[in-house]
Amino acid sequence: MAVVTLDGQVCQTGDALEPFSIQSISKVYTLTLALQSIGDRLWQRVGREPSGNAFNSLVQLELENGLPRNPFINAGALVVADVVLATREDPQAQLLAMIRSCSGNPHAKDDPEVALSEKANGFRNAALANFIRSFGNLQQPIDDVLDFYFYQCSLALSCVDLARGFLFLANQGRCPRSGNTLLSPDQTKRVNALMLTCGTYDAAGDFAYQVGIPGKSGVGGGIVGVIPNQLAVAVWSPALNVKGNSLAGSAALERFTDKTGLSIF
Amino acid sequence: MAVVTLDGQVCQTGDALEPFSIQSISKVYTLTLALQSIGDRLWQRVGREPSGNAFNSLVQLELENGLPRNPFINAGALVVADVVLATREDPQAQLLAMIRSCSGNPHAKDDPEVALSEKANGFRNAALANFIRSFGNLQQPIDDVLDFYFYQCSLALSCVDLARGFLFLANQGRCPRSGNTLLSPDQTKRVNALMLTCGTYDAAGDFAYQVGIPGKSGVGGGIVGVIPNQLAVAVWSPALNVKGNSLAGSAALERFTDKTGLSIF
Amino acid sequence: MAVVTLDGQVCQTGDALEPFSIQSISKVYTLTLALQSIGDRLWQRVGREPSGNAFNSLVQLELENGLPRNPFINAGALVVADVVLATREDPQAQLLAMIRSCSGNPHAKDDPEVALSEKANGFRNAALANFIRSFGNLQQPIDDVLDFYFYQCSLALSCVDLARGFLFLANQGRCPRSGNTLLSPDQTKRVNALMLTCGTYDAAGDFAYQVGIPGKSGVGGGIVGVIPNQLAVAVWSPALNVKGNSLAGSAALERFTDKTGLSIF
Amino acid sequence: MAVVTLDGQVCQTGDALEPFSIQSISKVYTLTLALQSIGDRLWQRVGREPSGNAFNSLVQLELENGLPRNPFINAGALVVADVVLATREDPQAQLLAMIRSCSGNPHAKDDPEVALSEKANGFRNAALANFIRSFGNLQQPIDDVLDFYFYQCSLALSCVDLARGFLFLANQGRCPRSGNTLLSPDQTKRVNALMLTCGTYDAAGDFAYQVGIPGKSGVGGGIVGVIPNQLAVAVWSPALNVKGNSLAGSAALERFTDKTGLSIF
């Protein structure tokens, strides 16, 4: 676990410097890239509502004609990836550069083995991509979209990297380390709102209720939380609960906000 | 529209003193009564997740065996009503007393004609109640549950009443006017979290994104918002959008948070 | 088990003279009454497709705006009951008279205790009726519709009664015993088609595949089958499979058609 | 339109000798191949129930864990194709040989342009295949399964070919022309039952009701019907109704069974 405050203090415990696959946590960065590229036009292709379904469900997508509920379910992240591919040159390099700059870790990188293994078993994501394409809501070649998606999921960061790397969301969009502005204050608030309502899949309500701060989880066992104007916090523990969120990580964050009294509510 | 701050200032405009049917906004008060009665045991009978469906949908209820997703969809409010009926003597009087005390309006009352008219057309709610009962998740007589539900929906308050009446949620559970403690600080944070993720039906994500504060809407055209440690705000305008939330009310709240820069994110 | 041929032969075995609750098998008779009353106009209010869902599901009804898939799921039978109530004087007496005449059993009657007990636990059917009413597809008072529905389900007949009572469907609509014409030859073929595609709930495909004749089952454990131009056959055994059809009854019918080589295919 | 009787008479009208893409009608032949290969073990991987959904829906597949409802919806046909690929050498050649032999048309062949064009737009089928694979219910390489599927859909036959080619299903499984036995009498009855309950997609109930015989349709505008022990009939007219069945074709078959009084009911 690691906590990094806006004024640069770092508190850490356990394996806080150990890199792990950030998986879906990467969706916050690709969303940031897409918002930088096309702004609010993104919302013509992705919704902003909690899905009420599992993160990789196709049911809702069928009922709603290929418009994913939000950018954090897999379907939405594929559309976001499609936007990034359409609007960026060398999107993998740009994503990596952003993450290295935010996290202050110039050695952060992907794990090609993880990407390869996910691709080999990624039938559900391939189904989603083909399905969205059948509704016309993907434009780049499906294999390119999937490759980029598996790449972003395979990026490896430590808790300290992640907490530092999410500070821009606690700081109105400006990275306190590099001084770079990634999002406008308004966009930042909205990304935080999206994390609160949709960041932990079908457990977002429970997470808001128990933890009370915007957060984003990944199936690698990581969760990052943001307390606006104060700090970012990251936890990592691989065992997952039935909703796909880190079991010990959720408990740690709940205890953290309980003991500190920190909450957005 | 009316804004009431924790230190007692009141700003108002338009028909802010005109009473109207608060409808689903009443669900916050009945939830408060139920939490006072049985605390966290409530969550064995109602979930805390956004539903991803229309407020009166039966689909999810069937797939999830009669456990409503959250206390703010109709199905959840019926279970909350069942708890209140089971644990309170003269529940209508207790609900009214709580609302009068919070709002500081001793003349607040229900509109029997509204209740009667809703009962006469309440086939969908009767379907929901019978359906939940078929799963064993209602225990009081169905007609009593429905009568209480139609009663709570028919309560009439003005914007000033509502903003004042929700101040306890901006004040860690204590009503600044009466000094009464309705909920613990912890429970208060959690009710606010529930309002943010589930308070405006299937538009909660959009509301969080656009307005950025916990809020609860009613089909009477009212919406109340809470900014913790600062204020409560109420708007009223009868025309609804497709999701069942006040059209002008949502826009007014969005502009209000935009211009003031107030947000929880 | 009982087999009755068009030329009047009766073969029986086991408790073939024991009356039992025919339950959903009664839906064929109420459908007959409704077709006599309003003919093909019925299909404006009920579909003719297999539902692909459990017999008492509300999901499909919501997605399809209160139009039940077919007259043999509970929702469809409630609409049929509504039609019968709207077009017949003393509908219970007319239904009973039709059944007594067809079956040749003048003592056939309902079991009020069964009806009462089903009413007391009929929350799911009450939910369905209220739900359909909310879409405007029920017109008679809900309690009247439910009472008629519980009455028809409580009618008690033996296997011999039932086999004889369904002979009109093997005889182009004319009851060979009384000589009365209940349906036109064309209507008869169509009721048989409906029984084949929808008569055994969500197991109709399997029943067609295994047994190969039109049939209608009830949760009382009875199943009646029709072989056009030849015979009707009824079985009764209370233990049900997961789809709500008699376990031993299905097996007996399968063996019956296997050994005799009788099939419509 | 063409009618061919068991004793070899052929009646035809219109463009009955014009070949067209048989599309989903081919699913009856691939089902026959799969039943020849593995018999009733097929039903461990495909159901036999009407789906109650559109032919290319993914919703039900998700709820039922990758087990398609029946072999005539696209998902089921993909599993059937997987079985054929796993159990046959040169499956395309074997399928073509069977169809040429049954239809008595040695020149019947596929249309590679149709297959190519369907492949290029086959995102929905690619989604289905990947989705089924994610549940482990496809074993051959996905591209091979899809290629075989697009191949079978692109086969072109005339109405006379098709009516003659389906005669074996009216003749207890034996092709009257070649004398070859394709299915046992028992299997034949069951394939007819499947066509009746599932052969015309989500309109099977209506087709059974209106036409009253087992039939299989394709989106190329063809429909074939079978009257056991008598004849097979094929119609072709490209304009489709909303359920994906030939509009004029359905009407022609309804009039045909009406006027001749032929029906299995």
Image (cartoon, coloured by chain):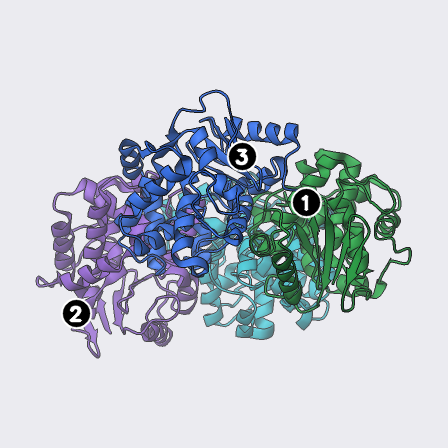
Chain colours: A cyan, B purple, C blue, D green
The disc placed on residue C7 is 3
Graded by Cα atoms within 10 Å as few (under 14), some (14 to 19) or many (20 or more), the crowding at tag 3 reads: few
Q: Position of residue D116 (x, y in %)?
A: 81, 63
The disc placed on residue A169 is none
Residues at marks 2 and 1, common chain? no
Tell me if residue B84 can be seen.
Answer: yes
Q: Secondary structure at mark 1?
A: helix
Q: Is residue D193 above or below residue B57?
A: above
Q: Position of residue A150 (x, y in %)?
A: 68, 54
**What distance separates the C-alpha of mark 1 from that of mark 3?**
29 Å
Image side of residue A262 versus residue A11, left or right: left
Q: Secondary structure at mark 2?
A: loop
Locate residue B54: give its quadrant: bottom left
Graded by Cα atoms within 10 Å as few (under 14), some (14 to 19) or many (20 or more), the crowding at tag 2 reads: some
Graded by Cα atoms within 10 Å as few (under 14), some (14 to 19) or many (20 or more), the crowding at tag 1 reads: many
**What distance separates the C-alpha of mark 2 from that of mark 1?**
67 Å
Locate residue C134: give its quadrant: bottom left
Q: Amino acid at mark 3?
A: Asp
From the viewer's side, name the closer residue of B265 and D1: D1
Total marks shown come to: 3
Q: Which residue is mark 2?
A: B19
Q: Amino acid at mark 1?
A: Asn
Q: Amino acid at mark 2?
A: Pro
Q: Position of residue D81 (x, y in %)?
A: 76, 47
Q: Which residue is mark 1?
A: D192
Q: Is residue C152 above or below residue B217?
A: above
**Could you tell me which residue is drawn at 54 percent across and 49 percent down?**
C189
From the viewer's side, name the closer residue of B154 and C175: C175
